[in-house]
Image: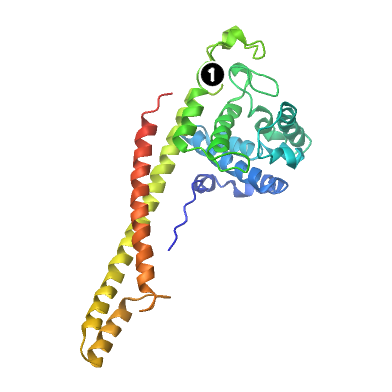
Amino acid sequence: MKEEFDFYDPTSLKSYNLDKTMQYQLNILGSLDVFTRKHCEHVANLTCRICEKLHCQKGFIEYCTICAYLHDIGKQFIPQEILQKPGKLTDEEYEIIKTHTTIGYDICMNDPKLRPYAAGPIYHHEALNGTGYPKGLTKKDIPYEGQIIRVADEYDAIVSKRQYKTHIGITDTLKIIIDNTKPLEDVKKSDALKVMSENSKLGKDNPIIVKALISVVIDDIEYEISCTFDYVNSLKENIKRLTEVEKYEEKMNKAKTDKKKNYYLEGMKIFLEKNETPENYHQILTEYRESYERRKKAIDTLFDEIKIIKKLKV
């Protein structure tokens, strides 16, 4: 038995009936590599749900979600050897990567159907303190949708297993993003940053949006716990059922007559389900028991993670 858990359940997106609205935009994503396409889908989902936590109006949530779907559309014109490079990028390669924002903006502006959502590509790497790109805008000039998509993008880029980086745990990812809400240290000593004095007390990310992200993540973990509980209960029932088979087999092995042996064998068969036989049920029962113990430990780990996350301060 194997359960499937979708961390990015699209229920929220469907609740806004976005399927038809975004069909064209989703087709556009088909030109992206599989990693970037999945990333865009995840960021859109997170953006939608962050907006819900922020109590945004439905129209804005729909708009912001579509902007998020398209935020990395410019990466289709970034060379694959750079986009999927397993090691650290050189300064020159990083400058090329950064152009995906302006390329994506141009793609949207040149297509009447995409033009309303050009904010997604152009603003999602801008930072409140002016250290972002492509224009180095500060808080007052970065639209709210850009601030939201930036946080969703950061979270998925760090926590996801990508071809070019090591997977980082959820709690550590949130700590990194929380750090991004804080002012940079020794700003005045860095000529490269050129942060305006009135923005020196700002971090890169909006703390209100980060708090909403944390709430979304907690919801996801609680949902995962619920799904795992359901699976554990299913395993428990199957273990109980096959344990009865085990008891019948013990009695069969002790029986003195063929009649008694056949009686207990038929009893075993009553409890067996599809693809289970008197010969293979031992292996299946062992797998159930091992999976049961793993899932119980996983639930404990998830509960511990929620406790840690709830103590994080933004």
The colour scheme used to paint the residues is rainbow
Residue 205 in view (yes/no):
yes
Label total for image: 1
Neighbourhood count class around disc 1 (C-alpha, 10 Å): few under 14, some 14–19, many 20 upward = many
Q: In the image, 127: left or right of 214?
A: right
Q: In the image, 37: left or right of 9?
A: right
Taking depth in this image into account, of 1 and 16 the one nearest to the observer is 1
Height in image: 292 above or below 157? Answer: below
x 44%, y 34%: residue? 171
The three-letter code of the residue at mark 1 reads Gly
Figure quadrant of residue 221: top left
Identify the image quadrant of the N terminus.
bottom left
Q: Picture coordinates of residue 72 (x, y %)?
A: 67, 37
Height in image: 260 above or below 215? Answer: below
Taking depth in this image into account, of 293 and 241 the one nearest to the observer is 293
Disc 1 element: loop
Figure quadrant of residue 218: top left
Q: Which residue is mark 1?
A: 203
Residue 55 in view (yes/no):
no
Q: Picture coordinates of residue 275 (x, y %)?
A: 43, 75
List the single residue furthest toward the right.
Answer: 110
Q: Picture coordinates of residue 220 (x, y %)?
A: 44, 43
x 47%, y 38%: residue? 169
Identify the image quadrant of the C terminus.
top left
Q: Picture coordinates of residue 142 (x, y %)?
A: 62, 22
Height in image: 157 above or below 296? Answer: above
Q: In the image, 278: left or right of 82?
A: left
